[in-house]
Amino acid sequence: SAVISQKPSRDICQRGTSLTIQCQVDSQVTMMFWYRQQPGQSLTLIATANQGSEATYESGFVIDKFPISRPNLTFSTLTVSNMSPEDSSIYLCSGTTSGDANTGELFFGEGSRLTVL
Amino acid sequence: AQKITQTQPGMFVQEKEAVTLDCTYDTSDQSYGLFWYKQPSSGEMIFLIYQGSYDEQNATEGRYSLNFQKARKSANLVISASQLGDSAMYFCAMRLIFGAGTRLAVHP
């Protein structure tokens, strides 16, 4: 298994501001991902966080809105920029200890619940 | 592109009975893996079970088993001897893509 911790666990933000979520994983994690879970919905992949280079974004997500960094193997940040109420969601950091996302189970952080007023 | 379909928004089961949660998938890949996760009301995501496309046996993990029918592209989760603590959302996933989920309620 792998230990993944993220913070903040929750926050209430004002429209137009930005918030950065931090994620720390243990050294067994090879690949890191960021998900969004809107209220009552499933998980949607935002991007794969790549160490030392730009993240790989999924369709519908752009770097200007969700800048992601991964300066080293065990740390990543997700920023939600210029927030609107539609950004109110749970943001989940996840990782796998497998080198192949096709076969390795995902481990998840506790999630960061953002409410945008 | 991969697609995961869970057609049961909600399911009910009596405690100690078995329940099957449906999952169908679509992929053009020959090699792939299917996962099931549990999300209790606390919000944490818990990995339950994995099935590889080339695995000859259906996966089992304790009270969880997978009814994998490759030709039908289905990977249904079977929970035996349901417990009250099994009440949660259950997600089927393939290659980082999650289905819509099924909310399971276990009744005493």
Image (cartoon, coloured by chain):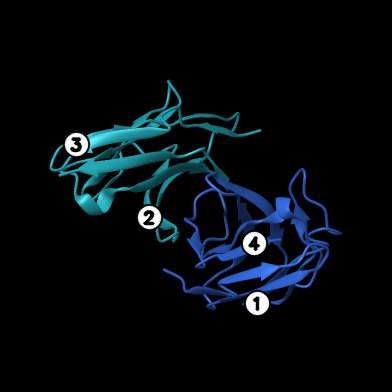
Chain colours: A blue, B cyan
Tell me the CA gap for discs 1 and 2: 26 Å
Identify whether B30 is placed above or below B35.
above
Subunit that carries the residue with mark 4: A
Q: Is residue A38 visible?
A: yes
Q: Tell me the SS state at disc 1.
A: strand
Mark 2 secondary-structure assignment = loop
Disc assigned to residue B18? 3
Residue at 31% over, 43% down:
B59
Q: Can you tell which of label 4 and label 3 is closer to the viewer?
A: 4
Q: x, y (%) of residue B53?
A: 45, 37
Residue B78 image position (x, y, % from top left)? 27, 37
Lower position in the chain sequence, tag 4 or tag 1: 1
Viewer-nearest residue: A8 or A58:
A8
* Lateral position of residue A67 relative to residue B71, left or right: right
Q: Which residue is mark 4?
A: A115
Reading the image, the residue beneath label 1 is A75
